[in-house]
Amino acid sequence: MTVHEILAQLESLGDKARRAHNTKAGAPDNQFGVKLGDIRAVAKNIKTDHELALQLWDTGNVEAQLLATLVIKPTSLSADELDKLTRSTTCARVADWLNSYVVAQHPEKEALRVKWMKAKDRWAARAGWHFTASRVNKGADDIDLPALLDRIEKELPKAMPEVQWTMNNTLAAIGIHHPKLRKRAVAMGEKIGLYRDWPVSKGCTPPYVPVWVDFMVKRQG
């Protein structure tokens, strides 16, 4: 299939109500409002097609970029190419799929994480904090966590919303997995107050750090 044919297929799968919902959630205008499950179904038919994925990404269309993350071959990307893809992301959903399905499979993801933790670009910084939170969750013992808390305390209140999300995830991860730093992490979350009133569905854990940490620690027993 060509890029033109795929875009036409995606457009046919679009829904006006979903498009409006996506726009309200921060997605750009260049999107059709396609269900994520439908995008996965299209990807299943395409399988892996690296060159097609790059062409889809370059359209700037949200669904095309989401589809690209599912059919691209991560190991065929150089670190520089992946860095450029990350910085050209169109919205948070695309950023999260790119991190989960592409960056996470790349052999140089740790070097990129370190680079992105110094980045001013919102999408690169979001990715850097995303993978830092992941490393904390997995028990990484080579990260200076007190220094990381110092940085979060200073930067989180004024960070861009896209970066705040994964920086907050890192704060919660420290509180959940490191008892000696838990009191400080929770106190920081309470003082900053980020996501204090975040609406959540019944049975879901809110991203407000004091509640999140308390819930996860109790669940660990």
Image (cartoon, rainbow, N blue to C red):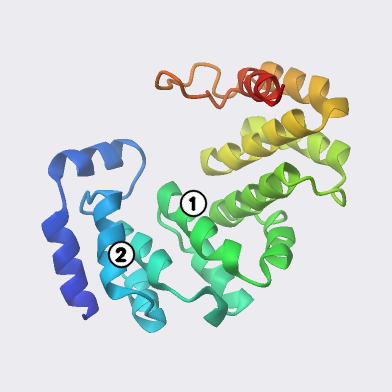
Mark 1 or mark 2, earlier in chain: 2
Residue identified by numbered label 2: 64
Rendered position, 185 above or below 75 = above
Q: Secondary structure at mark 2?
A: helix
Residue identified by numbered label 1: 96
Q: Where on the picture, by quarter, is residue 7?
A: bottom left
Q: Position of residue 8 (x, y in %)?
A: 14, 67
- For image coordinates 69% across by 39% down, the residue present is 170
Relative horizontal placement of residue 213, taking residue 27 as reference (left or right): right
Q: Position of residue 180 (x, y in %)?
A: 88, 27
- For image coordinates 29% across by 74% down, the residue present is 46
Q: CA distance from mark 1 to mark 2?
A: 14 Å
Amino acid at circle 1: Asp
Quadrant where the C terminus is found in the figure: top right
- Disc 1: CA contacts within 10 A as few (<14), some (14-19) or many (>=20): some
Amino acid at circle 2: Ala
- For image coordinates 29% across by 41% down, the residue present is 22
Q: Nearer the viewer, residue 94 or 44?
A: 44
Rendered position, 186 above or below 50 = above
